[in-house]
Image (tube, rainbow, N blue to C red):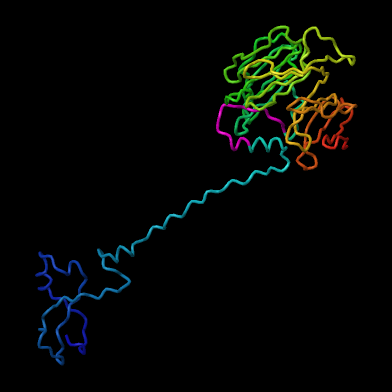
Amino acid sequence: VKPSEKIQAPVVQKSATAKAEGTQSQSEKTPVTSVPSQTPTQKSASVPATASIPVPVPVPASVPTPGTSAAVETEKQEPSPQPVVVPQPEEDDESGVPPDILQRRRETEKAQKSTKVFEELSLFNVSLANFRTLKLINDDDLNLRGLVYGEERGYLIHILEGNNEGKFKEVWKSPSLNSPVRELFVKDIDIDGESEIIAYTANGNIFIYDYENRDQVYRTPEGTYQNINCMVVENMDDDPQLELFFIGVKSGQEQSGSGEPAGNLIQFDTKSLFDEWTSPNLYTAIDMLVGNVDNDPEPEIILNTGEILNLRFKDVEWKNPDGFGSRLYLIDLDDDNILELVTEYGESYVRIFDIDSRQEKW
């Protein structure tokens, strides 16, 4: 067909169609059209009037031939998966959280998981220091594990398991301690990764129980002390384990002129289970704390009767002649990294002392 010749509407011959049946031809795979015979005024030496020549129909570029790679590309593409954005938890608002709780959080973030439990130091931002015979118990992640309390009348120690919903169930109670429980602590005193319950009673007995298996680890021999005025559980020396530091009134000692029982300061080693130091002097304090209340690196021992003692040598560094009331608390009130002493005088009033400057602050 010459380029200048006009192609008319196709005329399909029956004979050509019939002949194509029975054999597979290109027309079954590719759409075709037929070139008609020429009009009388048109001449073509190469194309007979009745011939039908299949000519491939040009396929638009936008419609690829099925079966080709181009057709695959034009198939509906699945949307590429979007990256999953994991929402980051909001940082806890730690405003208003007591410093002792913040310190405990920092310590537990670094500590490895263990069966150790801790005393909860505050509840709803209120100090639990006044609850001497009741301790709320947390685990490493500050989840509520339970509650331990000692009886005034029943002479028993009870362990209750609990959860963050505030539900408690008693799981153990001790044998009778034969005297009211005056105070108890829950601490890992021997640094073995498991906590112990330490309690002392009105008749001067000290009991230590394993928190997990409830076994009795220690009790003072009967008659060792007739009274224990007060106690702290702290590391009082250079070894890793904690010590029991208390005022113990030994049997046969007379009361002081003030009417309060006078006893020795005693440092009890929780590994050897023996007294490792006893003061030569007698003291009548009914509350004590250990903390750094001045600008030297060593903590001090503070007695409510007014004495401030050096931790290492147990020497009296200063004594307030008026004493410090009946209950003691330590807190840094002015952000100078030195603890102030907050004292309670019965139910009447509160006073604050700056021990570093040895004067009343408020």
Is 339 part of what is drawn in magenta? Answer: no
Residue nearer the viewer, 353 or 13: 353
Closest to the observer: 198 or 302? 302
315 with respect to 25 (left or right): right
- Vertical placement of residue 287 versus 34, above or below: above
* Left or right: residue 189 compared with residue 303: left
Where, quadrant-wise, is the N terminus in this rendering?
Answer: bottom left
Across and down, in percent, residue 20 comes to 11, 69
Q: Which residue lies furthest to the bottom in this view?
A: 41
Which quadrant of the structure image shows residue 301? top right
Q: Nearer the viewer, residue 66 or 154?
A: 154
Instruction: Decide whether residue 112 is among the magenta residues.
Output: yes
Q: Which residue occupies the foreground of this view, 120 or 4?
A: 120
Q: Is residue 212 above or below residue 114?
A: above
In this view, 355 is above or below 64: above
Q: Where residue 354 sits: x, y (%)?
A: 84, 36
The quadrant of the image that shows the C terminus is top right
What is the span of residues highlighted in magenta in the rendered image?
A: 107-123
* Residue shown at the point (74%, 31%) measured from the top left: 299
Classify residue 311 as left or right of residue 195: right
Labels in figure, total: 0
Which of the 4 image quarters holds residue 250?
top right
**Residue 273: % across, % down:** 64, 16
Instruction: Using the rendered view, name the quadrant where residue 98 is placed.
Output: top right
* Identity of the residue drawn at 83% across and 15% down: 262
In the image: residue 152, left or right of residue 175: right
